[in-house]
Amino acid sequence: FLDEISGGGGSTPGQKSLKGQGRYHPSKVQKRCKEILLAEGYVSSDGSGEEGDRKKVSMNDFEEWDPVKKVKLGAALIRMLLDHTTFSRPSKRRGRNAPPVEAAFRYSRRRTGEKKFHGYISIHPDLMNIALNEEFTSSSSLLIAPSKLNTRVQPMVVPPNDWTDVNNGGYETIKVPFMRTRHCKTQKDSIHRADLSKVMEGLNVLGKIPWKINRNVLDAALKCWQDGIVLGDIPSQVDYEVPPLPESQEYRDYKTLGDMEKKMHIDAFLKYREALNKHNRFKQKNMDLHSLRCSAMLKLNQAKKFRDFEEIFFPYNVDFRGRAYPVPPHLSIVGSDLCRALLVFAHPKPLGKNGLYWLKVHLANLAGADKMSFDGRAQFTDENMDNVRAAVNDPFGANDWWMKFDDPFQGLATCHEIVQAIDSGDHENYMCSLPVHMDGSCNGLQHYAALGRDRGGGKAVNLCIDDKPQDVYIGVMHEVIRRVALDADEMIPFDENKSNMTGAEKELLKRVKSARLVNGLIDRGVVKRTVMTSVYGVTYIGAKTQIKEKIDEKLEERGHDIDEIEQEIHTACGYLASMTMEVMGQQFKGARQTMNWLTDCARMIAAQGQPVSFISPIGVPVVQPYRQRRPFTVVTLLQRITLTNDSDKMPLHRQRQVSAFPPNYVHSLDSSHMLLTAIEMQKRGLHFSAVHDSYWTHPCDIEEMNTVLRESFIELYNRPLLEELKGMWEMRYPSINFPDIPEQGDLDLEDVRSAPYFFQ
């Protein structure tokens, strides 16, 4: 049937293709579907409409279609949508004077290369404006009810089913996979043979936590959307003005041009290329804005849909490394600031003796005052109590203190909770439903320090007892600032404009100019993401991109036209990325030694033509899915579509198998720590949820959660994890002579039990 609707002819001899018969009428397709279902035994032949013999087998099989079938069917459905979906502008005119009926969607092809085209589906502009500017209400004459606008997997209004095996758990009727295997058949086979009881227990704990919508935050977010206030996840609803597309340059054969004319033509081409790049950058910015608007609408629509429910739940599953994620993609605590602020525990608990204190600490953390002691953070909130009350009483008034937070909506939610607790007159008995977060201090480095018992690294990331929190980002920042200042002050002992510079002179000039451009712009935020992701295998290009986002912001604040100096910024951010990664490697030698050992072992395994695999501490079999990709073409009803094949039959992508292993292994460790903590919290009758290394509970239970997460961490690392990993590999690959495990340091894991800022 898919061949028929894709133009390849039917599988039955003599069956004509449905392609080329004009517009696709649903009745024709429906008739052909019934013929196929009858022939295959899925419906009865007596015309009664009863199910055929194979109906039950079909519903229970859930055999996954291959990508070719999915694409062919999808293209056919899109074609039917194009043929039969129409739109007319709202009007009171009738009869001949009525507005014309137009196609709601159009298909077009745009050239992207000499012989390449991309197909595009575009929506009627008036219909798009309605979608963006009108309320999604069931009374709308053009739009369907909001309950039908959301995605297939949404929050549940009853507790999800427990995971009992890899085929059973989560939703009542929708089947979702236990693991997001990225189509790796080896991994799918391995989880059927593994003991996943511990993992499933942890997922069931997370899935049974009841939530509800925070109406104060939802109302504030809706006001931002309706009034065009750009804040946090609410993007601008006004596009950037796109510079005009420059005229194409006439082709000239340089061999026929004189030196002066050649130089003029090259200069003109460079100006054309710069103007074209600027045009494309602003077009991309507008496309990004469009995506952000769609994302915000999905979040707000789901929050409005569930705002009146007393309880909602989020079924969980895991990725191929064992990391736990809620299944709903748009509204969940793993989402952005707005998503996290929109959700609170459905069952409140009294704040108790110290709950208000932890709410104040939580607000200080959100306000960026997280480099001081806990007492200092609580004092910070007390000193800003006028700002806190202003945020609650008049959130969009003259006092915009809370709007300057990195996570403004979570800050607003916390302000509401603090004010309500104080104004209750008895804050210890105030029923609070807002979760308070305790976050790991550069958690990847914490795991590396524990693996190698690295005391120096452990002290830098708060595994050791100290009366004030250590900030690893500040330490790296100071060293980077020192080195950049030295380079910026360096004298250039030659004419910068001379044309015959040596390679060494060019390098010196590039380094000094880059240092002078970024000198004075470097702060904690510039280096933070690169430091945080360095232990997760961030590449030079990734680090440069992270740093460039911050440098662009700072240069714009100083009045620079970043489009005019784009190339200089690009070079300077590459310079800064290299320096930051170099400083990281020198300051955390213990982590680097462990990472290098993991990398060397992965390289040996990949050299054997085998994917790197291991079993996580809580029993998750991990098989890295990275394979080389090979493109192939599928003929569909609309166009030829190029897909990529990266199945288990393809050769290994050895480079990715090696570079991705250290971060994947650490992710398996942080997921093990989180799920062990979740299980113990449930045994103690306490609410617990988490976003990887950010652990959440009621304010009154923070002290007990802090105890549990430390005990779980010590229990995890009292195991000889690297020895277990090496032994596992030696058993599986007896021909490989793996290197010795790096010598361990003298970090005492028991210090973690009393380290106050381990999670903060």
Image: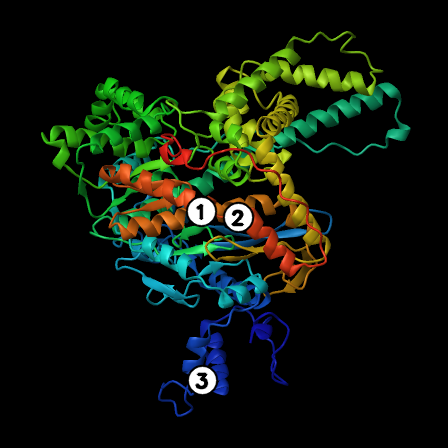
Q: Which residue is mark 2?
A: 721
Q: Secondary structure at mark 2?
A: helix
Q: Quadrant of residue 633?
A: bottom right
Q: Where's residue 425, x and y in %?
A: 9, 29
Is 668 in front, or is 558? 668
Does 699 sit above or below residue 523? Answer: below
Is 607 in front, or is 267? 607
Label 2 neighbour load within 10 Å: few <14, some 14-19, many 20+: some
How far, Cα to Cα, is label 1 from label 3? 49 Å
171 sits left or right of 63 in the view? left
Q: Where's residue 618, x and y in %?
A: 45, 55
- Front: mark 1 or 3: 1
Q: Amino acid at mark 2?
A: Leu
| Circle nearer the N terminus (1, 3) | 3
Q: Amino acid at mark 1?
A: Leu
Q: Amino acid at mark 3?
A: Arg
Is 333 in front, or is 601? 601
Contact? badges 1 and 3 (CB < 8 Å): no
Q: Which mark is residue 531?
A: none
Question: Which residue is at a point 64% across and 62% down the rendered structure image?
Answer: 648
Q: Secondary structure at mark 3?
A: loop
How far, Cα to Cα, is label 3 from label 2? 50 Å
Contact? badges 1 and 2 (CB < 8 Å): yes
Q: Which residue is mark 1?
A: 716
Quadrant location of the C terminus in the rendered image: top left
Q: Quadrant of residue 185?
A: bottom right
What colouring method underlies this structural image?
Answer: rainbow
| Circle nearer the N terminus (1, 2) | 1
| Circle nearer the N terminus (3, 2) | 3
Q: Which residue is mark 3?
A: 54
Q: Is residue 22 visible?
A: yes
Does 460 sit above or below residue 71? Answer: above
